[in-house]
Amino acid sequence: MKTTTSTYREAADYLSGLIHTVPQTAIILGSGLGALADRITDATVIPYAAIPHFARSTATGHKGNLLFGRLGCQSVMAMQGRFHYYEGYTMSQVTFPIRVMALLGVRRLLVSNAAGGINNTFHVGDLMIIRDHINMMPNPLIGPNDERFGPRFPDMTRAYDRDLIRAAEEIALEQGITLRKGVYVGLTGPSYETPAEYAAYGRLGGDAVGMSTVPEVIVARHAGLRVFGMSVITNEGYHFADDFVNDADEVVRAANRATDVMTRLFTALIERTE
Ligand code: 6GU
């Protein structure tokens, strides 16, 4: 697929024609945030298949809709299902929705994902604020730079917004939610890591590993969106016991168990911050 500024524009124009208010906040409902979709009121549901140039989501536990509506008093849009590089999409397809969000006038992006814990103090079900990432996937900005969105060499020193992190920590304290904070290592997948790989990424400075989020965050930061990210720890990769194996169904179950707390936290975060 050739992605030019006009393809993003066509998708944005199509969506503008269907919505009443331009949302300030976009949320990618990755694993753990599925239930947030049910909290969005006055929702306009737009299947990805209806949006010009959008790809379709195929991963287990992921749907394929854009939702526009209200969360509390805030106007939001949400991706119900995301595109993963391991599904065979190009990086342009994976990050296409982010640029459409930018064209629509969205100012900040909230993302969630399921991740394997490599910090040995983390346990299944823990929630981790992503304070930084290590990108081990192809960079989605490779290719001619689209100056309309951002600079050739975008800064990544503050990829995850410090004010949003601080606000999330305050909310967690008030609501008695325990949060971890750490570095997310973004890998292509789809195979899970070998024990040697878990150990290696831990020594590199990673706390959790996953197969999403980083491409979207890079493209969002390129376009100047403020970003907040959170991982649900769904397995403990630092266990070198002989009987430890990764199981995708168990990952989905662990992520779903975190959904209520995570939904509460994201809702409060959106309401509290501008
Ligand atoms: Cl253990 N590894 C990767 N790469 N992605 C994951 C995961 C593990 N758990 C959830 N997503």
Image (cartoon, helix red, strand yellow):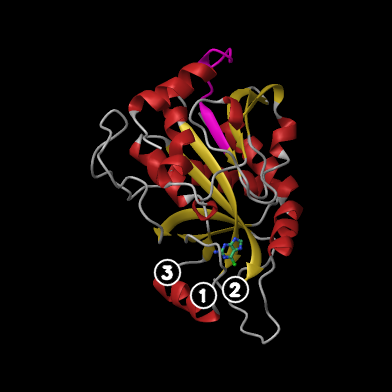
Q: Residue at x 63, y 50 (%)?
A: 59
Inspect this view and state whether residue 160 appears.
no
Residue that label 1 marks = 198
Residue 21 appears left or right of 244: left
Contact between marks 3 and 2 (CB within 8 A): the answer is: no
Specify the segment rendered in magenta: 16-27
Distance from Cα at disc 3 to Cα at disc 1 = 11 Å
Rendering coords of residue 53 (x, y %): 48, 30
Rendering coords of residue 126 (x, y %): 66, 60
The magenta stretch spans residue 25: yes
Q: Out of 42 and 144, give the one closest to the viewer.
A: 144
Secondary structure beneath label 3: loop
| Marked residue nearer the N-terminal end (2 or 1) | 1
* Mark 2 Cβ inside 8 Å of ligand 1: yes
Residue that label 3 marks = 205
Give, as a three-letter code, the residue at label 3: Gly
Contact between marks 2 and 1 (CB within 8 A): the answer is: yes
* Mark 1 Cβ inside 8 Å of ligand 1: yes
Distance from Cα at disc 3 to Cα at disc 2 = 15 Å
Residue 10 appears left or right of 191: left
Q: Main secondary structure of the magenta part?
A: loop
Q: Out of 267 and 200, give the one closest to the viewer.
A: 200
* Mark 3 Cβ inside 8 Å of ligand 1: no
| Marked residue nearer the N-terminal end (3 or 2) | 3
Residue that label 2 marks = 237
